[in-house]
Amino acid sequence: MARRWPLPLNVRHRTTIVTPPPAASRHAALRARIAGFAGVGLIGTAAHYAVLVGCVQRLGVDPVRASMLGALVGAVMNYLLNYHWNYRSTRSHLRTGPRFFAIAAASFALNGALMAWLVNALATPYLAAQLAVTAVVFLVNFTANHMWTFRGH
């Protein structure tokens, strides 16, 4: 006899065949996860942009360097919020942290390279460049973290 997913927690079945959730509910769960990741990302992005603008406007820091510093601040916020709120992870930080920050390091390099290209080579205004870069980095981060860092949550 096939049971629908998820099984009640108070019932133990030794020979029950558990069928996976239907595709519609998997898609709904994925949409909810993307929305949660985006919400967390907005908070991290706000911190990133605050550091970026503050460093450029108040301290006269080069926009590419300021963006890199902001990306570091945003990455730490994103990890903590995704770990505790979006994925509600119970895994060790020793397992999830290195994975998340390996992806963050790749995203950090991608952010810097795209910002340097857009600002220095194409003379794009730094805030417009950062908006475009943020969209690309979001897609890379969500996909990699969902498939590797927090897989199975």
Image (cartoon, rainbow, N blue to C red):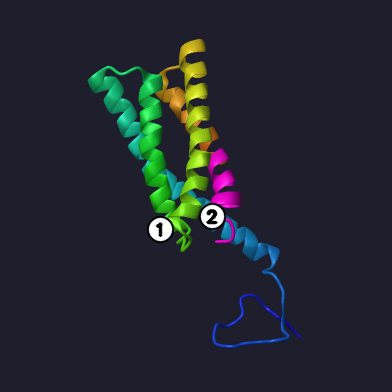
What residue is drawn where x is 46% and y is 23%? 129
The secondary structure that most of the magenta stretch takes on is: helix
Dot 2 amino acid type = Phe
**Residue 38 seen by the camera:** yes
* Quadrant of the frame with the N terminus: bottom right
Secondary structure state at the residue bearing disc 1: helix
Tag 1 residue: 84
- Check residue 150 for magenta coloring: yes
Tag 2 residue: 150
Residues under numbered marks 2 and 1 in contact, where contact means CB atoms less than 8 Å apart: no
What residue is drawn where x is 61% and y is 80%? 7
Secondary structure state at the residue bearing disc 2: loop
Of residues 71 and 42, which is closer to you in this image?
71
Dot 1 amino acid type = His
Question: Going by the image, does 23 lie left or right of 55?
Answer: right
| Gap in angstroms between the C-alphas marked 2 and 1 | 11 Å
Q: What range is drawn magenta here?
A: 140-153
- Residue 40 percent across, percent down from the top left: 42, 49
